[in-house]
Amino acid sequence: MQYYGTIAASFFIAFLLALLVTPLAIRLAPRIGAVDTPKDERRMHTRPMPRFGGMGIFIGVMAAMVSAAALLLPILPQQLQDGQISKLAGVLVGGVLIYAVGVADDLRGMPARVKFLLQIGCACVVCAFGVRITYFADLTGQGPTYFTGIVSFIITVIWIVGITNTINLIDGLDGLAAGVAAIASLAIAYTAFISEGMYTATVLMIAVTGGALGFLPYNFHPARIFMGDGGALFLGFMLASVSVIGPVKSATVIATVAPALVLGLPIFDTCFAILRRLVNGRPIMEADKGHLHHRLMAAGMGQKRSVLTLYGISGIMGMTAVTFSRGLLPEAAALLLIAFMFIYIFLTDATSYTKRRGVNVAAEERHTRKQNNDKEQ
């Protein structure tokens, strides 16, 4: 019962603090220069917006994690406590550092290459505390694939940096990144909850869920504040790092397969963006309007419907991870197929719809001009 109480406390501490602190961030942002002014057509907003909402998420999640750890660790069996304190400390230290990187970028701006190197540094800090992906789940029946030493270190750094940036890259519509992060963290928390020995990962991941949901009322369309790089990098970093925490026996699916499935939408969108920029001869880190959410907007769906549609796809991916972790492979494969079918539809039909819509708009404009000319004559 104390374990269930710790889960509930972790969620509500993060949720309430994010809910209460975010209004303070709205007032603070203009005073410190954390304001996002629309400078190009890629941005969806038309007026300056505070972009310091990550403060509420950060304070809520960190406070919940520290409180939950204090309640949880003493009640864990001794064999599960070994290494958990060090790993938890690494996640907390890394979280503080990655949030500082994001805040610096929100306030002063930072070259993409410098930000990327700092992200690698933050991931290395977490690895130094013992948070590692040591082997990959058995998907072929031949047994798990083990990683040791520098190979394990490099794979973990790549994983953390990659997931961190997927959340940052989808932060393009009101409420999108916060909602997807909440869905992903909840799915991973539940997957960990039904797995043996994943107590710490469950409690910490539910804190991420609470922080994202506490911020969402202020960020859903029409948004009053953006989370900024501070919030986006922090959420992605927490999702990647916490999912790796766990005893060796249980960590394989939770640390690798489940997050990859849950975050299938932003991972796919990121990979598609990299491929698109390489094909077009553009820098990989250059922003554009080719992301999935931009295509939905171009198809005329509007911000709310676009975001809710992507929530639905993320929810399907979350259920895919849960069914996979329970060994229901045919069901997981069916859900995965449905999710990618929707993604394919949006990536193809959205473009053709936009072209048709452009033709129709041009025709309407010509008709209007003709009517105005007739009236003048």
Image: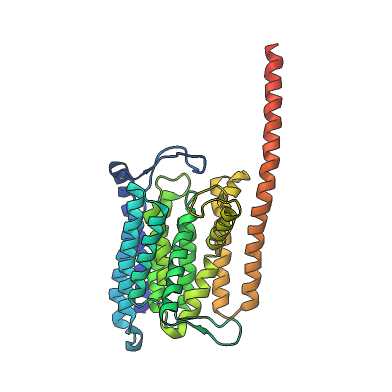
Give x and y (percent) for residue 79: 35, 88
| Number of residue marks | 0
User: Considering only vertical position in the picture, is 20 above or below 88?
Assistant: above
Left or right: where 42 falls relative to 77: right
Left or right: where 69 falls relative to 232: left
**Residue at 44% across, 46% down:** 223
Query: Residue 19, can we see it?
Result: no
Left or right: where 234 falls relative to 190: left
Give x and y (percent) for residue 224: 40, 45
- What quarter of the picture does the C terminus occupy? top right
Query: Residue 288, can we see it?
Result: yes
Colouring used for the render: rainbow
Query: In this view of the protein, which residue sits in the foreground, 219 or 109?
Result: 109
User: Considering only vertical position in the picture, is 262 above or below 343?
Assistant: below
Query: In this view of the protein, which residue sits in the foreground, 11 or 37?
Result: 37
Residue furthest out toward the top? 377
Query: In this view of the protein, which residue sits in the foreground, 206 or 250?
Result: 250
Give x and y (percent) for residue 279: 61, 54
**Residue at 33% across, 70% down:** 125
- What quarter of the picture does the N terminus occupy? bottom left
User: Considering only vertical position in the picture, is 178 above or below 259?
Assistant: above
Left or right: where 350 falls relative to 246: right
**Residue at 60% across, 51% down:** 280
Give x and y (percent) for residue 85: 30, 78
Residue furthest out toward the front? 281
